[in-house]
Amino acid sequence: MSSPMLQACSLTVLRGGRKVLDSVSFDIPAGSFVGVLGGNGAGKTSLFRAILGLEALAGGQVLVGGQIRLPGRNPVGYMPQIRGLVAGQLSGWHMVATALDGAAWGLPWYGKVARSKVDAALAAVDAQDLAHRPVASLSGGERQRLLLAQALLNDPRILLLDEPLASLDPARMRDTVRRIHALAQARGLTVLMSTHDINPMQGFMDHVLYLAQGKALLGTVDEVMTTHALTALYGAPVEVVQAGGRLFVVAEGGGDTLHSCDCGGVAG
Ligand SMILES: Nc1ncnc2c1ncn2[C@@H]1O[C@H](COP(=O)(O)OP(=O)(O)OP(=O)(O)O)[C@@H](O)[C@H]1O
């Protein structure tokens, strides 16, 4: 196994006075494609924000490439949830450009290098046709592509993608995962992608990072998506049920479906 690109060491994050992440530790090998799973409020976004240094840690640390992440360096690209996107009348090109290093200072003019970086990021996600369109006029899926271009802009080694499939129809979901996976392979990126439905990620993921009850479990799909492993993680009986080639994680008694994925061959 290659050396860890991303490490969480006893990471603790409080939100609203609650331990959303409670002394969580894991090592993500370089080049891994990781599905980050967990129900609503499990702490997926909080984890990403902690990795980015946007959350004050109540304990522990995050290491990138074996070192504490330094401010001002950008080995981590972040694609936020689309619901946080302020669209407005910016063109697609300018929206992507706002994520350039230095753009926070409000520079009104972009040099040749900056312009070619934005053009390259748009090309990487096949979004050149969106460059001149107002973001407000774009569909959810088109906006997602611009957000992904932003995340790629500063040549990250790690990509954190927060529910990039959220506003896509089922056919587009798998296509988007395939596209991101190919991009990651070509660039040697380590990718963490949060999702409520890992069905479209099946066959692409090297690991699942499952969050519940402030804890995290990292492993292969076969290791993590089992009744035994998830019951231990939740600290309460849950059942992993396979039906029609899909896998469902249900609460005790078969009530609420926590979420589902297509995980053919996984033992329950
Ligand atoms: N600013 C905040 N103040 C107080 N509590 C917060 C704040 N932001 C998030 N939380 C709480 O922290 C918990 C974790 O939220 P987080 O957004 O990390 O979960 P998530 O797994 O990404 O959820 P979802 O799948 O619904 O997006 C939730 O209980 C949420 O209500």
Image (spheres, rainbow, N blue to C red):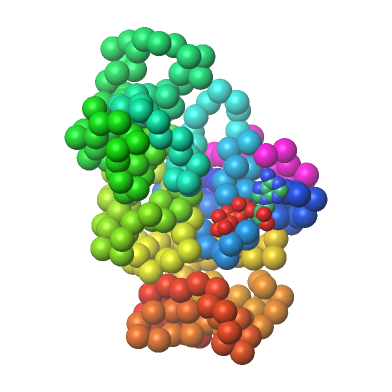
Reply above or below: 152 against 224. above
Of residues 90 and 108, the one drawn nearer to the viewer in this rendering: 90
Answer above or below: position of 117 versus 179: above
Q: Is residue 1 visible?
A: no
| In the image: residue 149, left or right of residue 119 | right
The front one of 220 and 137 is 137
Is 220 rendered above or below residue 244? Answer: above
Q: Residue at x 77, y 45 (%)?
A: 59
Residue shown at 29%/18% (left/top)?
115
- Image quadrant where residue 124 sits: top left
In this view, the residue in front, 144 or 4, is 144
Query: Above or below — where is 105 with respect to 217?
Result: above
Q: Position of residue 182 (x, y in %)?
A: 28, 50
Magenta stretch, residue numbers: 55-68
Q: In the displayed image of the protein, which residue is found farthest to the left?
A: 129
The total of numbered circles placed on residues is 0
Taking the magenta stretch, the answer to whether it contains residue 64 is: yes
Which residue is at the front of the view, 156 or 249? 249
Camera sees residue 61: yes
Compared across the picture, whether 156 is left or right of 132 comes to right
Which residue occupies 56% across, 23% down?
72
Q: List x then y, in percent, for residue 64.
A: 56, 39
Instruction: Report x, y in % for residue 101.
Output: 46, 21
Residue 146, quarter of the rendered image = top left
Please report the residue visible at 53 percent of the width from the left and 52 percent of the height from the top: 28
Q: Residue most toward the right? A: 17
Whether 61 is among the magenta residues is yes
